[in-house]
Each structure stands twice: as structure tokens, then as C-alpha cells.
Amino acid sequence: MFRPDQMAADLKTILRKYKQGRREDLIPLLQEIQADTGFLSEEAIVRVGSHLGLSTTKIYGLATFYDQFRFIPSGKVHFKICHGTSCFLNGSQGLIDKFREELKIAPGQTTRSGNFSVEVVPCMGGCYHGPVIMVNGEYQIHVRPEQVPDLIKRLKHIIENV
Ligand code: FES
């Protein structure tokens, strides 16, 4: 379960690894925080700003330039849809559209229920098996748009019965 005090402790540990005032560390630092917590909270942005000597406006400006950063928490189930060249040629756009249609959210968003979130990512290293998606870190290969409704239904059932 999410605990704000735990997050603060983790953030402190991560910040300690980076020298104060070294602005060139901004992106790796944000990447590490996101890898740890799943998104960049307002608190994290503020603390990174004071650690590196950057304004929060500047950090948001730079971070929003990169598609990889999220500013809201992920859903209980987080989908990563590969949109690298090979997956694109194998129909990843159809998958992105189907997830959008089924969940009523755009990539980068989380459903109001907090159950699902979607992210579109570059190559995930499984190009021969595209289109590839990741469901909470687990690969699913050769995914077709027509499989998406059933996949979501099954996962919803699991979430609601845990
Ligand atoms: S392009 Fe999708 S896994 Fe490489």
C-alpha cells in the first residue's frame, strides 16, 4: 500500500545519490524517481528543484518535453504499449486506439477508478513478436486489438476480486 512517509524516505535516498547543484543530473534523477514511484509527484519536483537549484517551472518544462514522464500515479494495472518501428509496422496504432476506446483515456492518463493506466513507449526489445505490450511489467506478444476488450475484462475481474 502507498505510504507518503515511505515515499519521502525513498526520495531522500535517491536524492542523496546525486550531487547538489549538478543540473545535468536532472533527467537521470527524474528517471530514477519515476522508476521507483511510478510517477513524478509535485513534492518530488519541488525537492528535486531545491536539490539541483532549478525552479519547478523549469523542471516541469523540461520533463513535459520528454514523453516518458508521468505526473499522476499509475493505475493498479499499468499498460505499456510499444510504438517502436517494428511494433508500429505490425499494427501498434490499432492497439493504442483500442485501449483508448475501451478505457476512455489517452496515453499518459489513468482511469478515474484508478484501475488502469496506459503509456505509449518506444521499443521494448521484443521486436520479432510485435505488437508488444507490457502489463504491470509482464510482456504480452502478438497482441491484436480484438483481444483488448477481453484482456481488460479479465484484469478488471481480478482487480475487483482481490
Ligand atoms: S519495436 Fe516494439 S518491441 Fe521493438
Image: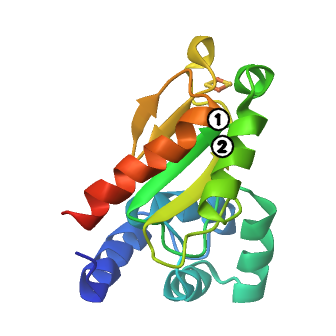
Q: Position of residue 131 (x, y in %)?
A: 63, 25
Say if 126 sits above or below 22 in the image.
above
Indicate the quadrant containing the N terminus: top left, top right, bottom left or bottom right.
bottom left
Q: Secondary structure at mark 2?
A: strand
For residue 14, what is the image quadrant? Answer: bottom left
Residue at numbered disc 2: 121
Q: CA distance from mark 2 to mark 1?
A: 17 Å
Q: Amino acid at mark 1?
A: Pro
The outermost residue toward the top is: 128
Residue at numbered disc 1: 145
For residue 159, what is the image quadrant? Answer: bottom left
* Residue shown at 73% from the left, 56% from the top: 67
* Residue shown at 46% from the left, 29% from the top: 140
Say if 113 sits above or below 98 in the image.
below
Question: In front: mark 2 or mark 1?
Answer: 1
**Of 138 and 157, which appears nearest the observer?**
157
* Residue shown at 72% from the left, 68% from the top: 63
Q: Secondary structure at mark 1?
A: helix
Q: Position of residue 85 (x, y in %)?
A: 78, 24
* Residue shown at 56% from the left, 69% from the top: 110
Q: Amino acid at mark 2?
A: Val
